[in-house]
Structure formats: C-alpha cells, structure tokens
Image: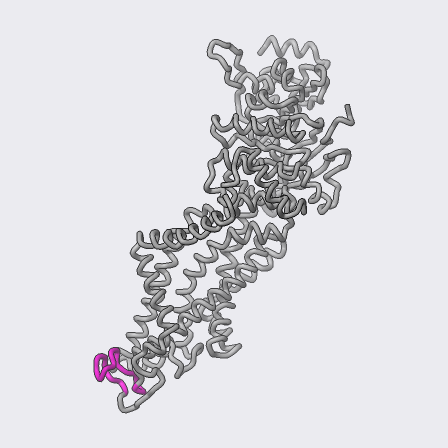
Amino acid sequence: MEDNNLVEIKNLKKYYEISRGLFKSKLIVKAVDDISFSIRTGETFALVGESGCGKSTTGKTLLRLTDATAGEVKYKGENILSLPYDKVRSLRSELQMVFQDPYASLNPKMTIKQILMEPLRVHNKFTPEERMQKIVDILEIVGLSKAHLNRYPSEFSGGQRQRIGIARAVILNPDFIVADEPVSALDVSVQSQVINLLLRLQKEFGLTYLFISHDLSVVEHMTDRVAVMYLGKIVETAATEELFADPKHPYTQALISAVPVSHPSEERERIVLTGDVPNPANPPSGCSFHTRCPFAMDICKTIEPKLKQVGNDHIASCHLYTEHKEEKEDAIIHS
Amino acid sequence: MNATEVMDDQINKKTSKVKNFFRKLSRSWTGMLGFGIIVLLLFLSIFGEWIAPYDPMDAPLSKGLLPPMTDGHILGTDQLGRDILSRIIVGARVSVIIGVATAVLAGLIGTIVGVIAGYFRGWVDVVLMRIVDVTLSFPFILLVLVINAIIGTGLTNIIISLAVAGWVIFARVIRSEVLALREKEFITAAIATGVSKFEILVRHILPNIFTPIIILASLQIGTYIIAEASVSFLGFGVQPPEPAWGNMLNEGKDYIFSSWWLITFPGIAIIITALGVNFFGDWLRDTLDPDLKGE
C-alpha cells in the first residue's frame, strides 16, 4: 500500500500570526493544524469542508505556494517542503494547480497563446514548432480551437476560461494536479462539462487529483476518497462510497444530510447544525466540533479525540467511537 | 487560419483600435477639447518657428509696449518691442518639452521605485516609502526651487528638478497597484507554473500597471507645465531672452497696471494648456480605468 502513494502529507501545519498591535501578544490562527493523509497514484482525493476550514491553504501549502509552519509533504518519497527552491521550481512541471476563479487566474494582458506557451518556455520543453503544435493539440483536447490563440481572456466565458486554466495545468503532462474548487465559480450547466473534462484528462494522462471542494454532490460524483476538514483538522477520511453510505463523524453526517436529494420523493433525515463556525483564532477546547455537535458529551469539551480506525480504510476522530461507551449511549438518548 | 489571415486579423485589430479611440473620444466633449488642445500644442511646438508672424527674439525698442491689434501685432508687444503672439507660439515648445520629458523621467523613476517597493516589500519597501514620505512633506514648488538652486537653471536642469521632486507621486500609486496585483490569482498561477520572480515582474506585473502609469503621467503633465511656469516666473528655470510662458509673466509683471497684455496672454496660454491636458487625462482615466479588461 505504502508504495502506491504519490503524495504523502504528514503532520502538516500552517499557522498565521496576526499582530494586534505593539503591546499585545500575537494571535495565532491555526489554518491547518497537524493533518496527515496520503494520495494514491491515479486516484482523485477530495478535501471537503466549509469555507475557511483550511482546505485551500492545504492545497497551496503542499505545492509550496505558501510556506508550511511544520510537517512533511512527500512527493514520490521526497519531502518537497525541505527542498531548495530552484529544485521546487523544476518540480513544478509535475505538480500543477487549477484555480478557483477563472476570472482572476488568467493574466488579462496575455493572449491564450502566451498563457499556454509560458509553462513550456519556463521548463524549456520542445522546439518552437513542437510547442506550437502542443498548444494547438491541448486547446483541442479541452474543447477550444486554434482560432482562439490570439484572443485575450476577456473574450471568453467563465467555462471557457476554466478550460484554458486546465489546459495550462496539463500542458506539461504533470502527474499531480491540485484542483482548488475548479467549478464553484461556474454555472451549474457548465460545471458538469468541466468536471467531465477533468475526468477525461485523468484517464488520458493518468493524472492524480487533489480535488478541493465544498460541493458534496460533485465530490460524490467524481472522487475516489474523501477527507473531511473542520477548523484546520481532518475529522474523517474514507472511500467516497463508504463515506456517503455510512458517515461516522457527526460533522460529516450533518454535511451529507445537507446535500439536496436527487428525487423529490426521496426522503432524508436532515441534521441541522446550530451556531456558527467558531473563530479559528480561538478554537474551542477538546473536540473543536463540540460546540455544534448534536451528540456532544462531557469528555468532548476537555479531551481532543484522536483519529481512529472505524471501518475498512475509514478513520474518524470522534469520542463516539472511543471507549466511553456509557456516556455515548447517554448522549444519543439525550439528543 | 493560415499565416496571412493571422496577419490580416492583427492589422484589422490595429485599425479598429484607432477607430475605437475616436469613437470613445467623440462621446465626451471635455475629452475632445483636451485632445484638440494637445494636438494644437504639439503642432505649435514642432512648427512654431515657421508659424510665428515675427521673430520672437527681435526687439525693435521703438515699438515697445504696443497694445493688442496695432501695427499687425495681434496680441501687442512687450517692453522691448517683441511680438507677444510669436513669443507665446514659440514658447509652447518649452512647455511641451518640459511637461512630457518630466512626466517620462519622473514616471520612470517612480515606476522603478514603486515596483521594487511593492513587489519585494520588507525593509526595502519601508526605506523607499519613508523617502517618499519625506519628499512629499515638502511643498512641491519649494522642493523644485531648492533642487534648481543647487544644480542651476536651464531647460535640462528644470526638467531634472521637476522629476526629482515629482517621482514620488508615481512611486506611491505604482506601489499600491503592484501590492494589489501580486495577490491576484494569476500571479499565484505563474508561481505554480514555475516562472521566476524576475519574469513574473516583467511579464505579469509590468504589463498590468501600464495603464495606470499612462493615466497618471497624462494628469501630471499639466502639473509640471504649471510648475515650470511658476519656477520661471520666480526667475529660476528657463532664462530670458529665450521665450517661455513663465518668464514672460515674470518680465511683464512690472507693467501689470500700464500694459495688461504682457501678462494676460501668456497666463491664458498656461491656463488653456493645463486645462486641456487635464481634460484629456481625466477622460483617459474614465475610459481606461473602469474596464481594465485586456488589450
């Protein structure tokens, strides 16, 4: 199993310091707090959670777009976080990213040709004629044509722009792509096209995805495994099917119950969470979810639960699955 | 699409850009007026010597202080008998050269400083911006006079003085533009592609601050023209007998009660010029700034 992992993240932490003035102590926001997971070659691994839970930060940190506070990111067995920066730069041809906002992620002053030429030029791949051919090929693969080469991003729709962003990410033939909410800025009608494009490219080029999203129906449709994040921590990891069929963590259960049902006659018990997400600068003690958890017990307020095996390839961090049986039954009765 | 078609496409784009410019200009009468004044100024500064009815340096003392519309002197003559209209026409060149050259020089220095401060931040930013703050805390004209007093008068020196006092405005604006730009997602995308810091600066940052530079420069030209006139009026800057609007005011001020036309017409020339340049700059800002969408 171990050898199968393309990317391994161990104890990754990313803290932000916020200074509150000269005489006050600095505030530390734990955007990503000690998370570990691994992504297997060829799979689509999803990172889901509410906005502000640290999923985008995780994606950026593991590509070294921001510096991690601590931890390891192993890519093909090598710790990216400790590599010197020019090594990282040359590694970038294998690790790519698709961004959330197609209106912000393309330089408005560059033509499509220049945008797609840039990765090839930077990594010094192919001869000039081959580059041109490659650009035309990739444009056709993502569903645009060479007539678009000399146009500017402002002349395209959101879906088309996202295709250009995807073309830029795959033109170097990378192994691993971080897709940071690639469809959340698009119309629903365009979302499925872009998702299908991503799936097709995965088959064609043997890509491995880290798919960051808050849209669970998209995650269910296209990913193999899912990690659920809450306030900078991973609370549950499982195979997608299993997670949607049998969510263990109360937060995951609440999330999944919020996905719209696909048929009006279908019924689902809806778990409505009360309260807001706590301030990440001042997280609750014990289990960070206890303030909103319908099953919260006394122990949750003091002791932080550890990630625990709760099924085949399925881990969750919740006291419901630790030893405190009596309390647990109490909690379930009271809820 | 074959090669010639691509070429045609590009040529069409060029001509349509020019058309587009005039179409947008025709929607604003202030923009058109400003553009007209600028075209007239450029024309005068290039062909002024041939258009001027008299030699601006020729001083027949017997014809001194003629009022306007006498003896073929449309705007009259000054105390030395020099034709005022001719001096205004030829003096346009000084104003245009100083306005444009200062804007280019100040824009260049300011852009370099602003980009460095905004892009690299840290202590470089702090040091550069404190220099800007100190420079801005002096009144502009006073600073120009001090520098001018140190390095001496003359056309080149007045340009240098104005630029040394004026680059700070560019540095401020460009720095804030760069600060906003470097947080944009396409910059992150370039980093994720593996583009080097220098290339990001040249290929991604600079093309995107070009528009604000142009807008700011066009608005600053008016300021520099007025500043040059002020400095020349105070006796620094362009020295007589070389005709410049500022030193015409200076020479005419002694006759302000007896011969009003000596200072009135150069003054009107300065006002019209500054107004025209500002009208055009405002129009440019209104047209370019709201939609910074490509091209």
Between A224 and B17, the one nearer to me in the picture: B17
Relative depth, front residue between B206 and B9: B9
* Residue at image coords 38%, 72%: B45
Q: Which residues are magenta?
A: B64-81
Q: Tell me: A91 left or right of B282.
A: right
Question: Is residue A245 on the magenta stretch?
Answer: no
**Main SS category, magenta section:** loop
Q: Residue at x 51, y 28 (%)?
A: A191
Q: Position of residue B222 (x, y in %)?
A: 39, 65
Q: Where on the picture, by quarter, is residue A331?
A: top right
Q: Residue at x 51, y 57 (%)?
A: B172
Task: Decide: is A211 above or below B238.
Answer: above
Nearer-the-camera pick, A272 or A66: A66
Residue A334, position as x, y percentages in the image: 59, 10
User: Taking the image as drawn, is residue B229 in sight?
Assistant: no
* Residue A131, picture quadrant: top right
Give the side of residue A28 with respect to residue B17, left or right.
right
Residue B274, relative to residue A310: is it above or below?
below
